[in-house]
Amino acid sequence: MTPRRILHLMSGSIACAKATGLTSAWVKAGHEVRVATTASVRQFVGHATLEGFCGHPVLSDAFNPGQVMDHINWARWADVVVAAPATSNLINRLAAGLADDAPTALWQAAWGRGCPMIVVPAMNARMWAYPATRDSVARLASWGAHVLPTADGDLACGETGNGRMLEVDDLLRRIGELMEATRDGTTAGLRVLVTGGGTREPIDSVRFIGNASTGRTAATLAEVLADAGHRVTWLGAASAVRPERVAKSESFVTYADLAASLRGLLAEQAYDAIVHAAAVSDFSVGGIDAGDGPGRTGGKLHSTAGVRLDLTPNP
């Protein structure tokens, strides 16, 4: 792999001990690494250890004498920025636009320079599932950050669940693929549009004809593509399983909704690839004949009415 300048941001987590393996492995592979930490990292791993691994002083206070401009200089220096471990606190602060310590200031200063921005979450399962954290992950992904998945298993708190930081070997592979996809400051990843889930064509206000597709296969494709460094737009059924790590999401219900959204998205930008995995209804409801029955009440057909549906083929 081409040697890179890696800016490693760390926030306070028991996973800091595991994350030092990243710094060590990168340096052994010929990369140059600089480390910046939140104040709480000292509770888990010492600066002497980190400096010993990377060979550079650690930046933990953006206002230290002689280091006041390092958040700008280091951001200009970096080929890739990796926040590992990224706690719920750090993820939510990055998404909120805060820049009140070394890692958050460096993140903002590096933004938009063409280098991959990678987030490696690590936290308790309930913190990973917390609504604010989920919203922040989606926001960062929509801005172009690569938010890697978490692992399911035993957590440091004694619980079992999702939120565990991926193992070092897995992270080295995933981050390496993202680094290799970026050359000369230009991301080589493709812009991909993925559709998924089944359309629903209304019969009345509560009934519909539709497809039982869950959209799970399409959502998995979208996440695999996003993890590989591509910018993925998800256009999924409102009832479908939703991918987490995509740049943009839109939803549809009917065939007409899907067609209109496709026209809008294709008019906004050019895509390198479109994966049509949506289960689109062959028919929409053209007309309803309730015969001599009681008809509708408030948009709902009476359950005792005999109904004939006129189905119209969709284009």
Image: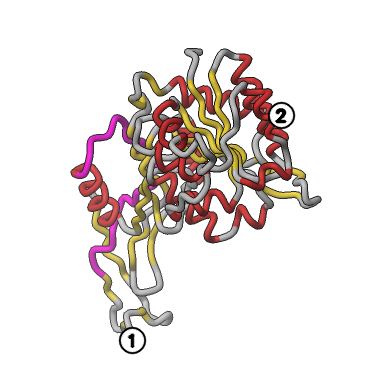
* Residue 154 in view here: yes
Q: Is residue 74 left or right of residue 165?
A: left
Q: Residues within 10 Å of mark 2 (few under 14, many from 20)?
A: few
Residue in the image at 37% along x and 19% along y: 183
- Residue name at image x 48 percent, y 32 percent: 81
Cβ atoms under marks 1 and 2 closer than 8 Å: no
Q: Is residue 283 magenta?
A: yes
Q: Which residues are magenta?
A: 268-287
Q: Secondary structure at mark 1?
A: loop
x, y percentage for residue 161?
71, 49
Quick one: 175 or 194, which is closer to the camera?
175
Front in this rendered view, residue 112 or 286: 112
Q: Which mark is residue 222?
A: none
Q: Which residue is mark 1?
A: 294
Q: Amino acid at mark 2?
A: Thr
* Identity of the residue drawn at 55% across and 27% down: 34
